[in-house]
Image (spheres, rainbow, N blue to C red):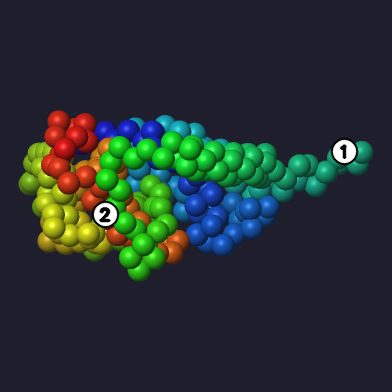
Amino acid sequence: MDYTVKLEIFEGPLDLLLYLIKKNDLDIYDIPISQITTEYLEYVELIKMLNLEAVGEFLVMAATLMQIKARMLLPREPLEGEEEEKDPRAELVTRLLEYQKFKEVAKVLESRELEQQQIFSREEPEFSEDDYVLGVSLFDLLESFRHVLEEAKEEVKEIIYQEIPLEEKIRYILECLKGKKYITFRQVFNPEEGRLSLIVTFLALLELVRLKQVFARQAQHFGEIRIYRLEKGDYSNGEGRS
């Protein structure tokens, strides 16, 4: 596919690991490396399929996880006089804890900056209805999209290379939101379409999120996702102007 979506507003490999740890209610100090590696690789395959720009960073972390997993599968008894070998996960845990603190501080600073500015250049939608106030990460979107793909019909090989313009799907999503406060994540996708069309639709949704023309919200972590329209105007020239 020729589409590439930039992820400057989205998260990276450490964010994905923290997401999986929280999703599975795991102890960050005692990560089941085999389980986390398997799930991480599933997300990497999806990111590769979508041709997302930051896939290289995720592949580097995948290699690190595989290396840690291999070291843990080959326990070595320390020889006499040798110190006990350090837990192969220790360095990764330290990185995750430091990154988690960094994110918390960044979030506080961002909140203070918004309070001081008190300037909103765009009309903000209301997210209080039914308490759908929690932000949605890239990985929440990917997780929901995985379920959409699982239910998709098989693509006919003869038409798999048909061109589906990204702009067409962007306009389609905005049209779905026309006159509505929100639509659910599932309503963005037509279950009768093939996998290729669904993929392009998902990339269009990511592009709209990146351009801040739509917001994704949920009532609880890992819950149903709603898509809210941010601007009243139409998509124009890929720059998010109305």
Left or right of 100 in this view: 13: left
Neighbor class of circle 2 (other Cα within 10 Å; few <14, some 14-19, many 20+) is many
Q: Which of marks 1 and 2 is in front?
A: 2
Residue located at (23% from left, 59% from top): 182
Viewed as shown, does residue 184 lie left or right of 175? right
Percent from the top left, x then y, of residue 145?
Answer: 30, 55
| Mark 1, other Cα within 10 Å: few <14 / some 14–19 / many ≥20 | few
Q: In which quarter of the image is the N terminus?
A: top left
| Secondary element at image label 1 | loop
In the picture, the quarter occupied by the C terminus is: top left
User: What's the residue at 54%, 49% (across, down)?
Assistant: 18
Residue 52 image position (x, y, % from top left):
32, 37
Q: Is residue 218 visible?
A: no
In the image, 55 versus 230, the foreground residue is 230
At label 2, the amino acid type is Tyr
Q: Which residue lies furthest to the bottom in this view?
A: 130
Mark 1 or mark 2: name the one nearer the start of the chain: 1
Residue topped by disc 2: 228
Going by the numbered disc 1, the residue's amino acid type is: Glu
Above or below residue 176? Residue 104 is above
Whether residue 56 is visible here, answered yes or no, is yes
